């Protein structure tokens, strides 16, 4: 179920990225109020499901509340973009860096967390977080190189196909064309 929520979160992030101008700097206090209420309800239901076994079969409600919370989180922070631009440059660069490797963080955390969860807290948090960020960045670099290579390969193939189509359309001597 958690992977579905991660996927849902990424799709919602994509939606807000595509429609960012619709929400950008759109000051609306009700978004922050709804976000606060959704988070209070989320954590309240989370605690209730842990404490009262009889209602634990309705935990799907918690996932719906989490998606609603996420929606209002995106709306709220999109509306606060003009304030985020004024943050110190190091904070903006770090935020940008994390945003760039978010998908890779999701990919590597499943391998890293179980392997280092046995270490005593807070040392485990430091080790796990560091390894996740480093591994995600390495995966990002490798993925970018592979993606660039594949893009060049596809561009080359498309160029050859287009050249063949031009030669065939113009009824040019085929031997000269290829």
Image (spheres, rainbow, N blue to C red):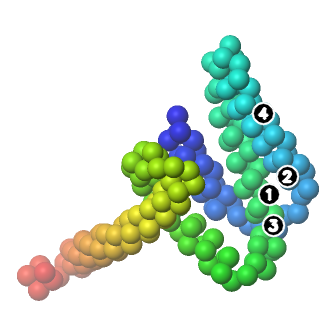
Please tell me how crowded label 3 is: few (under 14), some (14-19), or many (20+) other residues with Cα within 10 Å.
some
Tell me the quarter of the picture where residue 25 sits: bottom right
Tell me the quarter of the picture where residue 75 sits: bottom right
Residue found 44% across the figure and 67% down from its top: 134
Could you say which disc has been placed on residue 76 in the image?
Answer: 1
Asked whether the residues under the numbered discs 1 and 2 touch, taking CB atoms below 8 Å apart as contact, a structural biologist would say yes
Q: Using the numbered discs, state the Cα–Cα distance from disc 1 to disc 4 in whole angstroms.
A: 21 Å
- Would you name the residue on which mark 4 appears? 44
Q: Using the numbered discs, state the Cα–Cα distance from disc 3 to disc 2 in whole angstroms.
A: 11 Å
Asked whether the residues under the numbered discs 1 and 3 touch, taking CB atoms below 8 Å apart as contact, a structural biologist would say yes
Residue found 13% across the figure and 81% down from its top: 178
Could you say which disc has been placed on residue 80 in the image?
Answer: 3
Residue farthest to the right, as pictured: 29
**Nearest-to-viewer mark from 4 and 3:** 4
Asked whether the residues under the numbered discs 2 and 4 touch, taking CB atoms below 8 Å apart as contact, a structural biologist would say no
Residue farthest to the top, as pictured: 54
Tell me the quarter of the picture where residue 148 sits: bottom left
Residue 121 drawn above or below residue 80: above
């Amino acid at each position: 179920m958690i992977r579905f929520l991660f996927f849902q979160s990424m799709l919602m992030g994509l939606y807000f990225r595509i429609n960012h101008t619709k929400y950008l700097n759109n000051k609306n206090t009700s978004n922050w109020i709804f976000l606060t209420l959704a988070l209070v309800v989320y954590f309240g239901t989370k605690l209730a499901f842990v404490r009262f076994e009889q209602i634990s079969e309705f935990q799907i409600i918690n996932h719906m509340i989490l998606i609603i919370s996420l929606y209002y989180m995106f709306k709220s922070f999109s509306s606060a973009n003009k304030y985020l631009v004024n943050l110190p440059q190091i904070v903006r660069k770090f935020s940008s860096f994390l945003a760039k490797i978010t998908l890779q963080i999701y990919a590597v955390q499943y391998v890293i967390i179980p392997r280092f969860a046995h270490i005593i807290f807070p040392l485990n948090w430091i080790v796990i977080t560091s390894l996740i960020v480093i591994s995600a960045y390495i995966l990002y670099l490798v993925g970018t190189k592979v993606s660039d290579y594949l893009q060049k390969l596809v561009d080359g193939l498309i160029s050859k196909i287009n050249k063949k189509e031009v030669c065939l359309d113009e009824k040019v001597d085929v031997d000269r064309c290829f």
